[in-house]
Image (cartoon, rainbow, N blue to C red):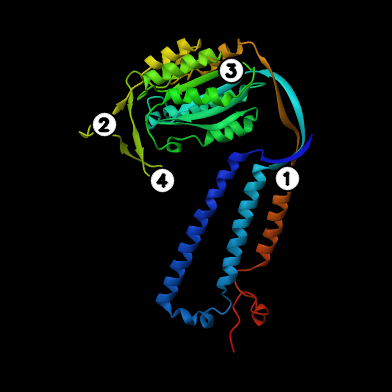
Amino acid sequence: MESNILRFENPQYLYWLLIIPVLVAIYVLIRLWNKRQFGRFANVKLRGYLVPMFSSARANTKFIIFNLIIALLIIGAANLQSGSKMEKVKREGIDLFLCVDISNSMHAEDIAPNRLERSKQAISKLISKLGGDRIGIIVFAGNAYVQLPITTDYSAAKMFLSTVDTDLIPTQGTEIGRAIELAIKSFGENEHNKAIVIISDGEDHENGDAVKAAQEAAKHGIKIYTIGMGLDEGAPIPLYNKYGKKTGYKKDKDGNIIITKLDDNILRQIAEIGDGLYVRASNSNVGLDKIYEDINKTEKSEIESNVFTDYEDQFQWFVGAAILLLIIEILLSSGKKEWESKFNLFEPQKEN
């Protein structure tokens, strides 16, 4: 079966593209500062007489080229690949949905660096161990959404996992029941063995809904495992501004700092209903490895999936374009050459 698909081998490098708007802001501020400083010395209209070889348009052009070079090198490092050969691959495994609690209490830092980040680290480590299993990610708080449909594309799984944060769902709560119901629906109609792993601190849940959903999963032969994130002493819930800087801690109506603690009663209950395991996380071990060991004891199903088996690197095109632009940038000096002033290459033409 022939087709085409594009992917980045190292998508995490693309985050470096965020440096470009920062450079633009710095450049604009420097230009404004220089203009203001020059204005103190002489009228801006006299610039052409005082520094005849200076060209604002040329400087801007060089800066644009410089940013394009950075962007091309970053994309080159991420290594865009094109897949041209797709084959049906048969493998043995199970279908696994990881349901991650992203309520604000998961930012508590009793489990370092915080409950959510530690969960993501453990999931990423698990994904690296997967072979024939299919994996999906569901995030939940006051509602539940599929962050990643069930797939064998582990690179995509890690990429989607990196975007998981508490701001994905504005409605607060811990609707474990909705997460289980969504997982049951999202598995689809197939005969594969299935399992659900709930990672949560267990707070603010509707126990009845979670129990009913777990019972429904058990009817479908779906095992449920749970991980309790949090320590006995608990921790306050950090608050952050839009720049990601900690500004304080969440308080109740009386102004007292709220301490969030693990409530694992419902987590234990649904794991028992789902014929799975409950594991309590600690700073030394989240417990996902122990759960996966138990899941691996389950009889594997034969899973057939379409997989691209041949990818071609395309990074050389971006690196080549960057080198070409670098040569052009070097040839363009910041000031005008005397002979270029005759052609006004970077200045608007004067009207007669």
Disc 1 secondary structure class: loop
Disc with the residue nearer the chain's start (4 vs 2): 4
> What residue is shown with label 3?
194
In the image, 52 versus 317, the foreground residue is 317
Which amino acid does the dot numbered 4 rest on? Tyr
For label 4, the SS is loop
Q: Nearer the viewer, mark 4 or mark 3?
A: 3
Tell us which disc is closer to us: 3 or 1: 3
Q: Which residue is mark 1?
A: 314
Residue closer to the observer: 187 or 283: 187
Which residue was labeled with disc 2?
Answer: 257
Q: Residue at x 73, y 45 (%)?
A: 314
Q: Is residue 124 visible?
A: no
Residue 163 position (above or below residue 339)? above
Residue holding disc 4: 243
Work out whether mark 1 precedes mark 4 in sequence or the reverse, and give the earlier one.
4
